[in-house]
Image (spheres, rainbow, N blue to C red):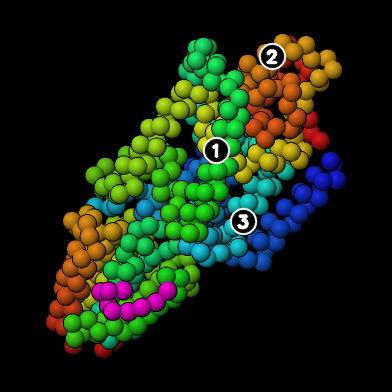
Amino acid sequence: MKLQIKRLISQIILLFSANLGYPGYPGLKTGFCYPFFYCQACPAATSACPLRSLEQSVDKGSFTWRLFLYPLLIIGFLGVLTGRAVCSWACPIGLLQRGTGRIARKFKKFPIARKLGKHKAEKYFRYTKYFLLISLVFVTSYLIGFIFTDICPVGLLTGTIPVLILNPGKFIPNYFFPVALVIFILFIVLIFLIERGWCRYFCPVGALLGPFNKISFLHIAVNTKDCTNCNVCSYNCPMGIDVPNMHRDPECILCGKCVTACPKHQITFERR
Amino acid sequence: MFAIQVTALLLVSGSLAGMFAFTPVYEDVRSGIVLVLCLSCLKLEPKTIANFTFETVDNQPHPEFVLENLSKGPVFLHYSGDSCAGCDVMYPVIKDLFSVDFGKQDMFHTLATFENSTVAYIYVNIHHTIDQLRNAQPLYDKDHVGGIPMFTVISLGYDHGDVKPKYTTVYGTLAVYGCETDAERLAYLTQLMEESIQMYNENSAGYPHH
């Protein structure tokens, strides 16, 4: 079976697994945190968003070490084993972006997109997700109680919208809704314009997983000795990485597109 | 590199296993995040009607602590939580309503005087409480919202020859009831309390626990 088909099956199975919590069908509500970005407010959610647990751990100057350490350890466990593969093999938002990627790839051919993609500031813009993680998940929650999940576009997509659809007329929007809606629209525009735009620049869970690429057992290796620098791998990379020159890049989501694309088969998954 | 990888894996998996084995973190996350949602996080407020009813969810019996407190006056159950903007909005309003003071992460219970009547006020921060109080929350979640902030007022009513606990529950920041400011929220809850005290006074003589 082709690698990308295996990945699609994995994504679909994990999407279903993440949604076994709908009351009665089968109503599985666990005390785990997802190792990816998904909202506990989804009527069918089985687990908690890791960011929610982190925010709660530092609520208004308090510190609950259990809630702080727990999501980090769950993410850390998978991170040490597989690095950021969770983003491409498990995350439902990754699956969504896989769907929008086809359109985003068309935009990639525009000269302006190429120019922006190659701009030297682009690689620094990728640090936005780390900034979001520290500022909106930890700092504002600790200092003023303002939390990322109140305006989270993924929460609106996977929590608010399904609740509104399943309970027509039973809810009214609160004061966070308009802000969250604007961010959600920007999120949708982003993922249609830039392939994996959310993962590249803004995903705080990706920021938690990324550094584990440096030490993970599973990683992607390039045989630079026999590489012809045709750059087919980089062109196919949804994260826009310069694949031949990468070494355990925190941006790599181990989707394997470069592995499949390499005409010389010089890119492989390595287990150590 | 292999040594680092193995060390990291042992450290992370050992710590995680230790947390599962020796701390209640699994239950904390389940009961405090997955089962009870923060309505601000949901970005929605439920459209509910504050009508009093005898029927608890799934007709479960009222908890003993509620029945005991009902012998002294109506019971006001205030469900709140950490990292919940709606809870933060309502927290000072409730403190004003009963003229009480307590920390947001405290467990707090008092017999408050409200317009010359006694009201048993019980504050439950869902993330810092005991099972007995936490487990009562779904019981009074009459509209199956499953979210906080949630306020339940339990009074007494007359039903087919018996005096029984009769309650209502309201949710969120009360925007659904037209309350946009703290003063409006206070006025709304005051009215709700007055109604419950009147019901209590009419029926308390027949209450078996009295």
| Distance of label 2 from label 3 (alpha carbons) | 40 Å
Looking at the rendered structure, the kind of residue marked 3 is Tyr
Category of crowding for the residue at label 2, using alpha-carbon neighbours closer than 10 angstroms: few (below 14), some (14–19), many (at least 20): some
Q: Is residue A26 visible?
A: no
First-in-chain label (2 vs 3) = 3
Above or below B26: residue A12: above
Q: Identify the residue at image location x=70%, y=22%.
A: A243
Q: Position of residue B185 (x, y in %)?
A: 22, 64
The magenta segment: B95-103
Q: Identify the residue at image location x=19%, y=72%.
A: B190
A28 or B177: nearer the viewer: B177
Q: Is residue B143 left or right of residue B4?
A: left
Residue bearing the label numbered 1: A128
| Distance of label 3 from label 1 (alpha carbons) | 24 Å
Chain at tag 1: A
Task: Count how many numbered circles sit on residues in the image.
Answer: 3
Residue bearing the label numbered 3: A70
Q: Position of residue B70 (x, y in %)?
A: 28, 82
Residue bearing the label numbered 2: A231
First-in-chain label (1 vs 2) = 1
Q: Nearer the viewer, mark 1 or mark 2?
A: 1
Q: Is residue A227 left or right of residue A45?
A: right
Looking at the rendered structure, the kind of residue marked 1 is Thr
Q: Are tags 2 and 3 found on a single chain?
A: yes
Q: Identify the residue at image location x=63%, y=57%.
A: A69
Category of crowding for the residue at label 1, using alpha-carbon neighbours closer than 10 angstroms: few (below 14), some (14–19), many (at least 20): some
Q: Position of residue A13 (x, y in %)?
A: 56, 34
Above or below B10: residue B31: below
